[in-house]
Image: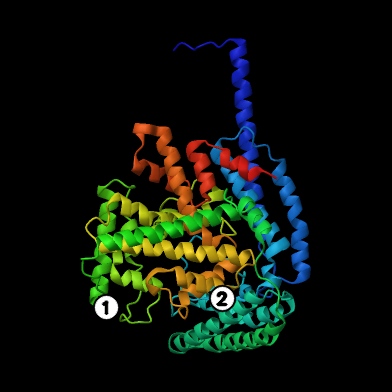
Amino acid sequence: MRLEMKSLPELTAALLLSAAGSSASDEYQELVRLFQEWRAFQAPLFDNGVPDYTAKAMAEQERGLEPFRRRLASIDRSRWPIPRQVDYELVRAEMNGLDFDHRVLRPWSRNPGFYRLVFPSETDVPRREGPVHAGAIELWQYRLPLPLEEVEKLESKLGAIPAILEQAKINLVGEARDLWGLGIRAKRAESEALASLIETLRERQPVLAPTAERAREATEDFGRWLEEKYPSATGPSGVGIENYDWYLRNVHLVPYDWKAQKVLLERELGRAWAHLKLVENRNRRLPALDMPRDEAEHQRRFHEAVSEMIGFLRDEEILTVHDDMDPALRVRIGRFSPPGPRMDFFTNVDYRDSLAMRTHGTHWFDFARMEREPHESPIRRAPSLYNLWDSRAEGFATGFEEILLQAGLFDERPRAQELIYVMLANRAARAIGDLEMHANRMTLEEAVEYAVRWTPRGWLPKEGATVWFDEELYLQQPGYGTSYVVGKVHIEKLLADRAQKLGEDFRLRAFFDEFLASGVIPVSLIRWEMTGLDDEMHQLWKP
């Protein structure tokens, strides 16, 4: 075999390139190590099973943040490919999130809702929405009766609730009126959840019932304490437009500020209403959509909708369909209740045509993918903190509704097309409440009333749980309410960029496969990785 001889300049260049690659790889491994250390640092310390959010502990954590940020800034990423630079940006954004928590949100001292500790239902996003206490219990993860090790784990968590709430009485010094009111609502709901748990435990795991009873007593006592303090809470709850813009740019990596989002959302709200009225007029001679009469019909409709949607995705080459996607949707059927005048928003939609709500089910595709093929990057494999993923998770789920409408999924269901625009109008309306609450131009109740008024057909009742849950979350987590619609618009922009670049070579399935493979991360980072366009990144990097 003949060996090819290189000239001295060629050999020197090759050696330099190899050395540079080795150095860049070492720098990336340093980022991974820093990320792992950062995650350990970010979590609060525990004292006898109780997370320490006291003023002293939080002051120490705030002081400890700056050395991590200096270490991150010292990493030379100039020779890294874009995917690794994306990982760097994710770590930077998380550190900015903790900085914002200490400077602005301060949930441990300002937001009584932070001390909501029992979550009966599973969330459909990578991490629980909003600021979440480290002692919170994801109750849905426990399947009774529990094995011994799980009994001990749940008993420890329930047993810590009284001490956590006593600490909260010391920690909470804020005067944010709407946040205080939300805390009272949260504790009432939590007391009801614990009461239901106690009844179940008495039947299926009686050894845990006394601990749960003490947790409920502490929860009700804390609720009474909040009610006593509530009259003195007279301050604003929003973060203000300047802080909101900083948070969008530096934590959620969204290139649209408060003002731009207001324009986008008002445009999408108007478009949704206009398109709804056009479709209603086209359908005016068609019979109204009927609702399921019983559980059997509800189940039949649900399962037929899953089959129809999965088949459409495969046949129309929208994205690659994997074997785990069908069951990921099918197990989310939910409970059936007879239709009536007090139905909340999504029940109103789902009972009229089950296919409309299934189009939002991309959340469950994300979960299936995380299980099937965890991302090769250890930084993307772990769901980001501070809800960095909201523009991607909620934006894609919302955007996919209208994407599938335009792709033809509802061609044989003309009345169901109306439901897509009803949902879009609802999400735009509640998002405007997010913006206005944080600008301190609307109270929580005014944001609720705005969403109720601008949701078509009266399907979002003010007395229902949905509107209050939504606006409660948005007031605690700036930018979450806008992420559904603004994320949708951002993804549409990315699709256009990619199509323009590829021309006749553009294929929808290839686009979505590449999009999903990037992970559940901010859309701005996915766009940078997929297109190489860095205009948005330069906008985000501005001081």
Say which mark, if any, is on residue 295.
1
Which of 514/162 is in front? 514
Q: Residue at x 44, y 59 (%)?
A: 270
| First reached walking from the N terminus: tag 1 or tag 2 | 1
Whole-percent x, y for residue 231 in the image: 69, 84
Q: Residue at x 43, y 89 (%)?
A: 203
| Residue 358 at least partly seen | no
**Quadrant in the picture for residue 12:** top right
Q: Residue at x 66, y 78 (%)?
A: 164
Q: Amino acid at mark 1?
A: Glu
Asked if residue 123 is positioned above or below residue 390 in the image, the reply reads below
Quadrant showing the N terminus:
top left
With 516 as the anchor, is 259 left or right in this view?
right
Say which mark, if any, is on residue 25.
none
| Residue 420 at least partly seen | yes
Check disc 2 and report the residue beneath it: 445
